[in-house]
Image (tube, grey):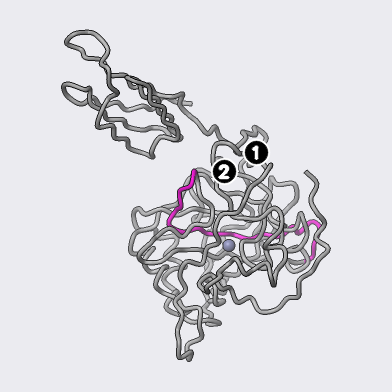
Amino acid sequence: TERKSLSQHPQKTDHVLHYLSPDGEKAWPKKYPFCGGVFQSPIDFHKDILQYDSNLLPLEFIGYNVPSTDQFTLINNGHSVKMYLSPTMSIRNLPFEYTASQLHLHWGNRNKSEGSEHTVSGKHFAAELHIVHYNSEKYPDITAAMDKADGLAVLAVLFEIGPFNPSYEKIFRHFRNVKYKDQKVLVPGFDIQELLPDRLDEYYRYEGSLTTPPCYPSVLWTVFRHPVKISQEQLLALETAMYCTESDDPEPLEMVDNFRNVQEFHERLVFISFHWFLSSSVKVSCVNASVQRKCKMIPVNIKYWNGSPAALQKHSNLLSLQFTQLPFLLVFCWCIGSCKRVRYSQSR
Ligand SMILES: [Zn+2]
């Protein structure tokens, strides 16, 4: 599909985001027309729009291991917490070489930890990291690149709850110094690749937009399939540490729910570097072993571990389940008798 040219340049005015105002993000297009336009992000990744592409190679990260003698600036910009990255950092294995500019986070709130922007089969993750790069082969800096169709490449990492994550703590432990808008702090350099999931070869790739005004449709997205884990305490720190307002504001506004809702995704495809269904469907039928004949009902008390099944078909005495991750554990009971426990882990 041909992209519309990005000839319109909305004025660069204040970047106050009103996720929380009565109209919220619905009001963005009035001031920023691209927000109501094409190729918008984030989106939901679901079976119907995904297409496997064997040409999708793992990205290569150049200069990501930044020595501790270098320093990053971490800033509260009033709608997120952002860390400026070193121009010596870049990524390869995309159509162009892209140089790192900054990273920032999106999250929910302490009562509802569903703060990711991208979703998978309708499911939100706890939070999301974006590492923003610009096309340094064609453009001199990010300002020149951000409104061009091939201007930006963003890496996205989804978060889920797990053990304490020492790598993310290298950023999170500075939150108390950027509690209020416009506050800054210096963070010693470290290996930014530690913030990425272990599996870098499995990802979603599509053409979309900035998820904040002015929403330019200029982003080549790489969303890693496997989330990283941070602890409950670390997530809570992210959800409660910061304010959108300056330190002397008489009405402090908590920085929460700074994610955009998923956008329409008509007649477009997301390319994936992995096979969505790793296992063929698992059929669970109900057989009464003592009399060696099929029961008239489906098995009961079905429980799974490692994700819920992506597809579920019920017949009178047969259940089809499809899983998107291996291995998984399935526990179910016959209509009469004891429960059966099956672990599926066949290799790809
Ligand atoms: Zn973002």
Question: On residue 203, which mark appears?
Answer: 2
Distance from label 1 to label 2 (Cα)? Answer: 9 Å
Q: Quadrant of the N terminus?
A: top right
Give x and y (percent) for residue 185: 51, 78
- Circle 1/circle 2 CB separation < 8 Å: yes
* Mark 2 neighbour class, 10 Å CA radius: few under 14, some 14 to 19, many 20 or more: many
Q: Which residues are magenta?
A: 121-140
Quarter of the image holding residue 72? bottom right
Quarter of the image holding residue 145? bottom right
Question: On residue 56, which mark appears?
Answer: 1
Q: Nearer the viewer, residue 176 or 149?
A: 149
Residue at 33% from the left image edge and 60% from the top image edge: 232
Report the amino acid beneath label 2: Tyr
Q: Is residue 181 above or below residue 173?
A: below
Residue at 38% from the left image edge and 32% from the top image edge: 327
Give x and y (percent) for residue 94: 70, 47
- Looking at the image, in which quadrant does ligand 1 appear? bottom right
Report the amino acid beneath label 1: Leu
Q: Is residue 135 above or below residue 294?
A: below
Residue at 57% from the left image edge and 43% from the top image edge: 203
Q: Is residue 2 magenta?
A: no
Is residue 333 found left or right of 254 in the rendered image?
A: left
Q: Is mark 2 within 8 Å of ligand 1?
A: no
Is residue 190 found left or right of 216 in the rendered image?
A: left
Secondary structure at numbered mark 2 = strand
